[in-house]
Image (spheres, grey):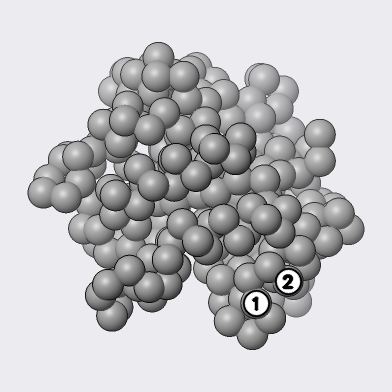
Amino acid sequence: MPTQLSVNVNKIAVLRNSRGGDEPDVVRAASTCLDAGAHGITVHPRPDARHIRAEDVYALAVLTQSRGVEFNLEGNPFAPPRVGYPGFAALCGDVRPAQATLVPDSDGQITSDHGFDFSGDLGALRERVAELRALGCRVSLFVDAGCPDVERAAEVGAQRIELYTGPFAAAHAGGDARAAIALCAETARRAQAVGLGVNAGHDLSQGNLAAFLQGVPDVLEVSIGHALIGDALYAGLDATVRRYLEAIAHG
């Protein structure tokens, strides 16, 4: 199966929230991405609602279901509910996303910057994964390239991993990504050997996407937001999504 492109529209919500009101419209932006050929939509609602809010999750669920495409909901399954944020499991229970990507981030993080540590007791994570799978969600766990025990993602019931590609992107920008891509490829192979599908995301861009996919075997899905929305400021959202799809094809 060709690598799927899921567009993360968090940054559209950041722009909207900076002014207040409803513009730019997150659902309209997501619909434009799908019209251009994107295979799905990703959002990462955070407890402080600094970009995507609960009502956006509900509206995007309606859109993606009506279009018959994947809705990928990211979040920390251990973050407690609070005003305006019912909790990750509650959101998944309400909208039943096709995929739930679990990320071990804290409230204060600007963006996700590390994967799960599988070295300790995984009982609580196993319970969260089982809860989400019972809702019909495919569960993916955010992991670092080089994770020493990535195989344990399968032990807790996950069906996929998402490789954190930030270090690869930094190495590519520095001019020598050989070691970083080899580490990603090795981690992907180990995950696939125990039956896990492999997704990837974070700092992937038009400039590095093809190289990443050429170096890492059988990536099922890439989730891209920051670079894609930034490129769209200059080229437009429709044209930018099509360029990312071309980069995937070249990869």
Identify the residue position indicated by label 2 in the image.
239
Residue 6 visible to an observer of this rendering: yes
Q: In the image, is residue 128 above or below residue 113? A: above
Residue 105, disc: none
Q: Secondary structure at mark 2?
A: helix
User: Foreground: 150 or 69?
Assistant: 69
Residue at left offset 76%, top offset 63% = 242
Q: In the image, is residue 248 above or below residue 171? A: above
Q: Is residue 242 left or right of residue 130?
A: right
Furthest residue to the left?
83
At label 2, which amino acid type do we have? Ala
Q: In the image, is residue 60 above or below residue 141? A: below
Quadrant where the image shows the C terminus: bottom right
Residue at left offset 51%, top offset 49% = 42
**Residue 107: % across, % down:** 24, 55
User: Foreground: 49 or 101?
Assistant: 49
Cα distance in 3D space between marks 1 and 2:
6 Å
**Residue 155: % across, % down:** 50, 17
**Residue 86: % across, % down:** 19, 39
The image quadrant of residue 67 is top right
Residue at left offset 83%, top offset 61% = 246
Furthest residue to the front?
66
**Residue 234: % across, % down:** 64, 85
Identify the residue position indicated by label 1 in the image.
236
Q: Is residue 114 left or right of residue 245?
A: left
Residue 150 visible to an observer of this rendering: no
